[in-house]
Amino acid sequence: MPTTSSVAHRLRRYTAGAALILFPALLVGQALIDPAAGGTGEVMYTAATEHREALTASALLLLVSGLLMVPAVMGILHQARDRGAGLANLGAVLGVLGGFGHAAIAFFYILSLALAGGDRAEMVAYIERFNASPALAAVAFPLILCFGLGVLALPWAAWRAGFIGWWGPAVATTAVLIHFALPVAIIAVEVVALVAVTAVFGHLGLRVLRMTDAEWGGVPGAAAAPVPVRTTT
């Protein structure tokens, strides 16, 4: 009969594995329905007045994906406790900060729902002033950048830990570089990049879910560590 401790450890593994699969998969759906790509005043006003349901659903997907970054990075941190530990720590910090960035976008979408019913010119001008705010540029944009950097770093940490083949970080790096290189958002390219990222993190999530309790709880390299022999004189 499983103990309370083993049940808790298994729940942690299931949560981490599911989060690794879901956080990028939700972003694929979000990119497909997002009516506010670009976030300009005209775009946000049109989204709030003509596509309220899609804007709300997009915000919720962003919010849930951002929250799932915490258990997702814990799944990689749990495996990269020896080789790749430093890179995993860096990727975890960036990933969680990036999750905050996506949550910030989600709340921006939710607040923008109030634009409906207002004077179009005034609402558009307000969003444009909001987007031009130095405080927004200093806080929100770096958080959003952290998400891409975290998605880039975490697969390399998993590769260093022997948790995925070289193809994983190569695919994730290519997807992130394509995203950063685009001068403007192209939905088809964004979706393809997110599908590629989902394949990488989905593979990591499935590996976590398929682990035994012993594999999940074991410390990498512990089995190979020499055991000191006590001698008597």
Image (cartoon, rainbow, N blue to C red):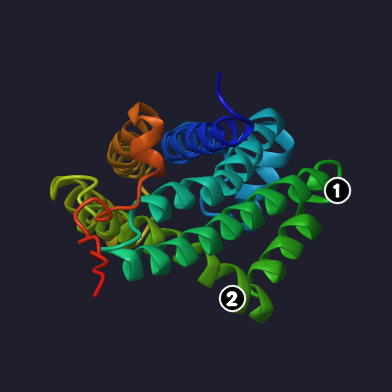
Which amino acid type corresponds to the residue marked 1 in the rendered image? Gly
Residue 68 in percent (x, y) is at 55, 44
The residue at the point 35 percent across, 41 percent down is 194
Screen quadrant of the C terminus = bottom left
Does residue 25 appear left or right of residue 137 in this picture? left
Look at the numbered disc 1 and give the secondary structure of its residue.
Answer: loop
- Of residue 101 and residue 229, the one placed in the foreground of this image is 229
The residue at the point 58 percent across, 54 percent down is 39
Mark identifier at residue 137 = 2
The residue at the point 43 percent across, 40 percent down is 20
- Of residue 217 and residue 152, the one placed in the foreground of this image is 217
**Residue position marked by numbered label 1 in the rendering:** 118
Residue 225 in percent (x, y) is at 22, 60
Screen quadrant of the N terminus = top right
Does residue 100 appear left or right of residue 158 in this picture? right
Residue 195, quarter of picture: top left
- Of residue 195 and residue 133, the one placed in the foreground of this image is 195
Residue 117 in percent (x, y) is at 86, 41
The residue at the point 64 percent across, 52 percent down is 103
Residue furthest out toward the left:
166
